[in-house]
Amino acid sequence: MTARASRHSPDSKADILTAAIEVIRRSGAQSFTIDAVAEESGFSKGGVLYNFPTKDALITGMVEFLGGQFETDVLAARAANLGSKSPTLSGMIDVTERWLETRRDVAQAILATTVDRPELTEPFLKVKRRFKAAIADETDEFGKAMAIWSSLEGLHFSVAHCVSILDDHERAKVLSELRNHLEQD
């Protein structure tokens, strides 16, 4: 961000959240401080605190921000998969694949910042609950759909916990298999 931004601009919160994610992405959760976010964003510490009065508020804001990005991406992918047996779940497969290729450090960052305060992940859980309800409305095979979703979660969390034993090629095969399983009768 250039010069000190107005703390009242419509993009202030998004700019701060983007900077906060970048701090964690680049330096890890141990470096996540209000001062580091202020420096990265170009806002004063007071400007950051005006928008996010506590570190927990900033973390919750990041989780909400990322949840909104995930929801937007899944809804766009859903629209591209309307012929699927579960367009929402198909969209989730597509977005999980893309995020694991391009944004895997985001999961690690959020995990690291919320480990002591799991309740801060509630905004993302709300997004997931909406997707669960949509999937339930789209399919008569709810158990199958949840098994596929659980596999996606496993892929995502194994990467976030840095314990994945799959390389990118193997992960792509698993995702392809999940797509095939979704469309099977």
Image (cartoon, helix red, strand yellow):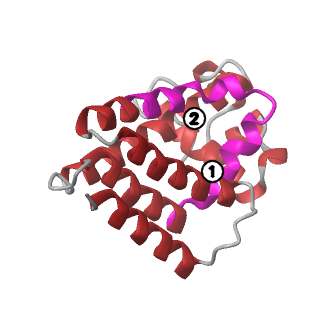
Residue 163 vs residue 40, the one in the foreground: 163
Q: Residue at x 57, y 29 (%)?
A: 61
The x and y percentages for residue 64 are 51, 31
Q: Residue at the left extreme?
A: 83
Q: Which of the pair 106/22 is nearer the observer? A: 106
Question: On the image, which quarter does residue 158 sit in?
Answer: bottom right
From the viewer's perspective, is 131 left or right of 26? left
Indicate whether 28 appears above or below 173.
Answer: above
Does residue 142 belong to the magenta stretch? no
Secondary structure mostly taken by the magenta-highlighted segment of the chain: helix
What amino acid type is highlighted by mark number 2? Val
Q: Single out the residue that lies furthest toward the front.
A: 185
Residue at the image point whose x is 27% and y is 39% from the top: 140
Q: Is residue 46 visible?
A: no
List x then y, in percent, for residue 25: 68, 55
Q: Secondary structure at mark 1?
A: helix
Given residues 136 and 23, the one toward you in this image is 136
Residue under numbered circle 1 = 107
Q: Is residue 118 above or below residue 17?
A: above
Q: Position of residue 12 (x, y in %)?
A: 49, 32
Alpha carbons under labels 1 and 2: distance apart:
10 Å
Q: Is residue 122 visible?
A: yes
Q: Nearer the viewer, residue 153 or 42?
A: 153
Range drawn in magenta = 102-130
Above-or-below relation of 28 to 75: below
The outermost residue toward the right is: 30
The numbered dot on residue 63 is 2
Q: Quadrant of residue 159?
A: bottom right
Kind of residue at disc 1:
Ala
* Dot 1 crowding, Cα within 10 Å, few <14, some 14–19, many 20+: some
Residue at image point 66% right, 43% down? 110
Residue drawn at 75 percent across, 61 percent down? 162
